Amino acid sequence: MSPANQDLWVSERFKDAVETRWRVKETLYHAQSEFQTVDIVDTEFWGRMLLLDGLVMTTEKDEHTYHEMITHTPMLAHPNPKQVLVIGGGDGGTIREVLKHPSVERAVLCEIDQLVIDSSREFLPSIAGALDDPRVDIQVRDGAAYIAQHANTFDVILIDSTDPIGPGARLFNHEFYTNVKNALSEQGVMAAQTESPISQPSEVREINTLLNGVFPVVKTYTNMIPTYPGNQWTWTFCSKQQGPFDLVDAKRVEAIEKTCRVFNRHVHRAIFALPNYIQEMIAPHSFLYAKQSEPLSV
Ligand code: SPD
């Protein structure tokens, strides 16, 4: 992040090739935690913005897309999600969306960095406010260690991580996702943020290969996050048995869409319609077969 106080701009540099800048009205918070730098700035266009190690995590204006996408598809794929785990996500936005589902009895937030939780509570109340709900159990711990100790516990697990660098790197490997699978109940499902097909195509491909090596069902979906590098983002749904729509209850979808800014029954389906270049990126062998064999329906 550039020194926002001096020139009133904050920027994120990507691969030393692209730099995106946003005008800052005010720097609200800056700290160095044990794990990363934590900044919250008030920007002219996107409202308040949380950055970790200089990378944009969320903004008041576009956070809804990210948090609704990572949450509602997996939550609706489970017939009765009661026990939910969010790994990362210390800003609280994913927990806020999880708690919209009335079946939830306990939502565990496992975030490694107390400062992310504290600063979000203070400066991002519209995102972090749900952390005070009595159903929320906050564990300030390493998510990789936590998941290894909780076999067969959760109906839904959401991996709301940073990028696969810094503290988030330990959440992108075979052992971690094997432990996630083991931590799921029988009909359990999980979703993870899985990077940008525009700016990080090799990461998208590698994570997809990793997930396919662990879960029987792996489905990638996309939407736009304008403040992330590449703008187009992916999340990946995984389960041991059901697909994202196999057990969906239309009444639950109807109730959830009323509470959302982005998610609705049509978006729910449309996000799984992958452009050819993403299909090719994540399934180069099946892509050609699918193109030739699936009937056209318009
Ligand atoms: N490049 C940014 C990826 C950040 C993903 N996590 C965002 C956390 C929002 N709750």
Image (spheres, rainbow, N blue to C red):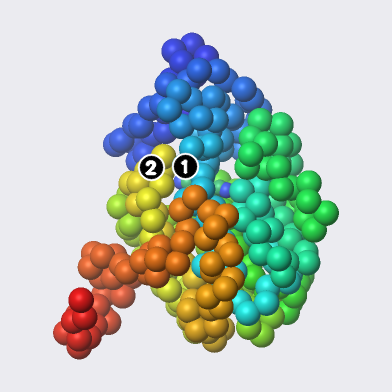
Label 2 belongs to which residue?
A: 226
Label 2 C-beta lies within 8 Å of the nearest ligand 1 atom: no
Label 2 close to label 1 by CB (< 8 Å): yes
Residue 120 horizontal side relative to residue 18, left or right: right
Q: Is residue 140 left or right of residue 265?
A: right
Measure the alpha-carbon separation of dots 2 and 1. Answer: 7 Å
| 215 in relation to 127, above or below | below
Q: Amino acid at mark 1?
A: Asp
x and y, in percent, of residue 186 in the image: 66, 85
Image quadrant assignment for residue 41:
top right
Could you tell me which secondary element the residue under label 1 belongs to? loop
| Percent of width and height locating residue 168 | 57, 52
Query: Mark 2: which secondary structure?
Result: loop
The response on whether ligand 1 sits within 8 Å of label 1 is: no
Asked where in the image residue 178 lies, by quadrant, the reply is bottom right
Question: Crowdedness of circle 1 by 10 Å Cα count: few (<14), some, many (20+)?
Answer: some
Between 74 and 215, the one nearer to me in the picture: 74
For the point 45% across and 23% down, the residue is 44
Decide which of 249, 93 is in the foreground and name it: 249
Q: Which mark is residue 62?
A: 1
Q: Tell me which residue sits at (26%, 65%) in the image.
A: 275
Q: Quadrant of residue 169?
A: bottom right
* Amino acid at dot 2: Pro
Q: Is residue 53 visible?
A: no
Expressed as whole percent of the image width and height from the top left, the position of residue 103 reads: 72, 70
